[in-house]
Amino acid sequence: MNNLKAFLIEEIKGLTFTTVNENDSLLKAKVLDSISVVDLIVAIEDKTGLHIPTGEIENNFETVNHIVSYLEKKSAQ
């Protein structure tokens, strides 16, 4: 999943013009706003083929590591 981490970090940088590390706060620090979250979800869904319900965003998208962990669990289902 290191490729996924790199992908997420690059996507976030492209969407927000902000460089983040894997443990940086994305939502509480307002790195991602509602539009960039939607754009990130679309990119993730395109890359992984997984569907991400909006109700699962708040608890799973706080850091890059949280997103990767969430996607690993989701892909194992």
Image: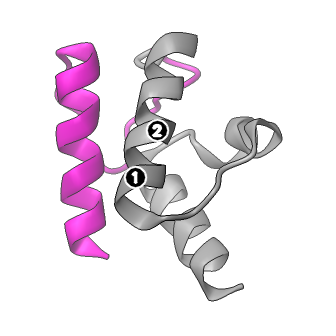
Residue sitting nearer the eye, 64 or 40: 40
Q: Which residue is mark 1?
A: 46
Residue 33 in sight here: no
Magenta stretch encompasses residue 42: no
Query: Quick one: SS at disc 1?
Result: helix
Q: Residue at x 35, y 58 (%)?
A: 47
Q: Is residue 2 above or below residue 31?
A: below
Circle 2/circle 1 CB separation < 8 Å: yes
Q: Residues within 10 Å of mark 1 (few under 14, many from 20)?
A: few
| Quadrant location of the C terminus in the rendered image | bottom right
Magenta stretch encompasses residue 11: yes
- Res. 28 image quadrant: top right
Q: Residue at x 54, y 55 (%)?
A: 66
Residue 15 spot, x, y in % from top left: 27, 20
Residue 52 in sight here: yes
Three-letter code for the amino acid on which mark 2 is drawn: Val
Q: Which residue is mark 2?
A: 42
Q: From the viewer's perspective, is 16 left or right of 70?
A: left
Region in magenta = 1-30
Q: Residue at x 47, y 44 (%)?
A: 63
Q: CA distance from mark 2 to mark 1?
A: 6 Å
Q: Residues within 10 Å of mark 2 (few under 14, many from 20)?
A: some
Residue 22 spot, x, y in % from top left: 32, 50
| Quadrant location of the N terminus in the rendered image | bottom left
